[in-house]
Image (tube, rainbow, N blue to C red):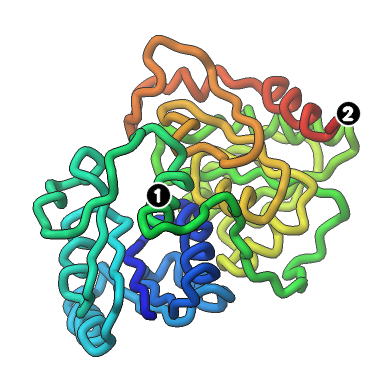
Amino acid sequence: MNILIVKLGALGDVINTLPAVINLKEQTGAKIHWLVEPLSYPLIKNHAFVDNVIVFDKHHWHGSLGNVVQKVRKQKFDIAIDLQRIVKSALLCLAAKAERRLGFDKARCKEMSWIFPFERIPASDPKAHMVHQYLEFASHLGLNTSDIRWEIPLTGKHPFDLPEDYIVLNIGATKPANRWTPQGFASLAEVLHDKHKKVCVLTGAGEDLEMARAIGHRIKVPVFDLVGKTTLPELVEILAGARSVVSCDTGPMHLAVALGRDVVALFGPADPKRTGPFRGEVVQKILSCAPCNQRICEDPVCMSTITANDVLERLERLWSV
């Protein structure tokens, strides 16, 4: 049996798909093919439950599209599953030579992708956690979905000389409204250093360098600043070695959960019941305007009113278990 997974990105979405893929692989014995974008490719290329990865580069689609279509037409699939639920993924799923094509029910589809002639899974709660929503496809195929795990591959090689028992502060977020304040991160690093003798490691992408500099200008204790200095495989090893991870609503938060770390997630515009950490603690202020699901906000009080003590309280709660 051959199963094609169409889940292109982002990183957090790909991570939340892994429990469904693992159940499909283990219980059907199928060969798993995954159509994904370059961002998440390093995470799944060596995954034990993924047999073949097909990369679609939307930024160079003129050269990539023909190659992708050729590959999904060359291989005969028993099942193709569109987990992205947008027109682009539906078209790629439609292009595949598959006996069955599965997709979300109409209410959960985006961009009118429900018009494609796919077999639709039954309607369900659109506010359920995305891990559970992706697992519904395995349930639809008659599989047991009680076993939830990610099996992120690790090398055990630490790319940087970091102290023991460090805390990762992942400072970035793709959506501007999801970002915490530089003062918040600086104050948290200081209280962790002064009260618990913990050293913090800052992580983030190249676009987070300005935030890292702003934190550096405010902070009064030593930290390891790795913002913009890590590849995805290196970030995996850094998160895996951490005592705990504090993160905004972004892909590395889900990665830390998948690696079994203690996670405290900082939420504002989004609903953590749906896209929050599958396991861990959430800090979210109760406000009349939240969650609003906005990408940009002129006055993101839902994030700016989160304090270092709010986060410390959740960390200490995790450490006391």
In the rendered view of the protein, which quadrant contains the N terminus? bottom left
For the residue pair 181 and 261, the one nearer the viewer reads as: 261
Return the x and y of residue 217 as percentages of the image width and height.
65, 37
Within 10 Å of the Cα at label 2, are there few (<14), some (14-19), or many (20+) other Cα atoms?
few
Element type at mark 2: helix
Count the marks: how many?
A: 2
Image point (40%, 10%), residue name: 288
Q: Residue at x 43, y 65 (%)?
A: 39
Q: Quadrant of residue 317?
A: top right
Residue 64, compared with residue 248, is above or below; it is below
Tell me if residue 260 can be seen.
Answer: yes
x and y percent of residue 103 in the render? Answer: 25, 55
Does the image show residue 43? no
Mark 2 or mark 1: which comes first in sequence?
1
Residue sitting nearer the eye, 243 or 303 = 243
Q: Residues within 10 Å of mark 1 (few under 14, many from 20)?
A: many
Q: Which mark is residue 136?
A: 1
Q: State if disc 1 and disc 2 touch (CB < 8 Å).
A: no
Name the residue nearer the viewer: 45 or 133: 133
Residue type pointed to by label 2: Lys
Q: Secondary structure at mark 1?
A: helix
**x then y, percent, for residue 200:** 76, 45
Q: Would residue 128 appear left or right of 151 to someone viewing this image? A: left
Q: Is residue 87 above or below residue 274?
A: below
Mark carried by residue 195 = 2
Between marks 2 and 1 in the image, the one whose residue lies nearer the viewer: 1
Which residue type carries mark 1? Glu
Q: Quadrant of residue 259?
A: bottom right
